[in-house]
Image: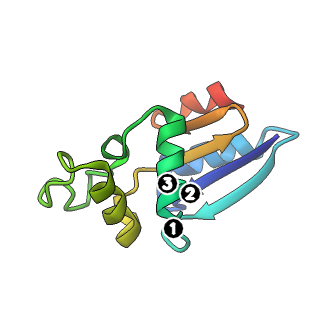
Amino acid sequence: MKATIWHNPNCSKSRAALATLESNEGIDLEVVQYLKTPPSKEKLAQLYRDAGMSPADGLRLSGTDAKERGLVEADPDTVLDAMIQNPKLIERPLVETEKGVRLCRPSDVIQDII
């Protein structure tokens, strides 16, 4: 099974999800450090859609100015544009497999898609 994780190595939840994926035999893993290589707006929209979330649900609020910028109440395109311009606004980790997409917070939700 192929799995892609949008990963931040400084995040404990992201490291936990990555460890789970790495310990699972048979997973062809792609690790994308999204702060260095952010997803396109289209890809990010698809990830949230497939996860059953809105872009606002995927906003990182801790350590960002998302609330101050009004992004929590903003329309999806505005939120996605802000995330692409400043990937720090993307909550992590997002994991995609053929079984679906999850924002792995808490990290045990990864079990739904592996």
In the visual, does 30 lie left or right of 9? right
Coordinates of residue 75 in the picture (x, y in percent): 24, 49
| Residue 51 visible from this viewpoint | yes
In the image shown, does 31 or 48 lie closer to the viewer? 48
Please identify, in this view, whether the residue under mark 2 or under mark 3 is nearer the observer.
3
In the visual, does 38 lie left or right of 22? left
Residue type marked 2 = His
Coordinates of residue 60 in the picture (x, y in percent): 32, 52
The CA distance from mark 2 to mark 1 is 10 Å
Q: Quadrant of the C terminus?
A: top right
Secondary structure category for the residue under label 1: loop
Residue type marked 1 = Pro
Q: Residue at x 56, y 57 (%)?
A: 7
Q: Residues within 10 Å of mark 1 (few under 14, many from 20)?
A: some
Residue type marked 3 = Leu
Q: Which residue is mark 1?
A: 38
Q: On screen, 28 above or below 38?
A: above
Q: Which residue is mark 3?
A: 44
In the visual, does 58 lie left or right of 26? left
Q: Which residue is mark 2?
A: 7
Secondary structure category for the residue under label 2: strand
Q: Residue at x 31, y 49 (%)?
A: 76
The residue most toward the top is 112
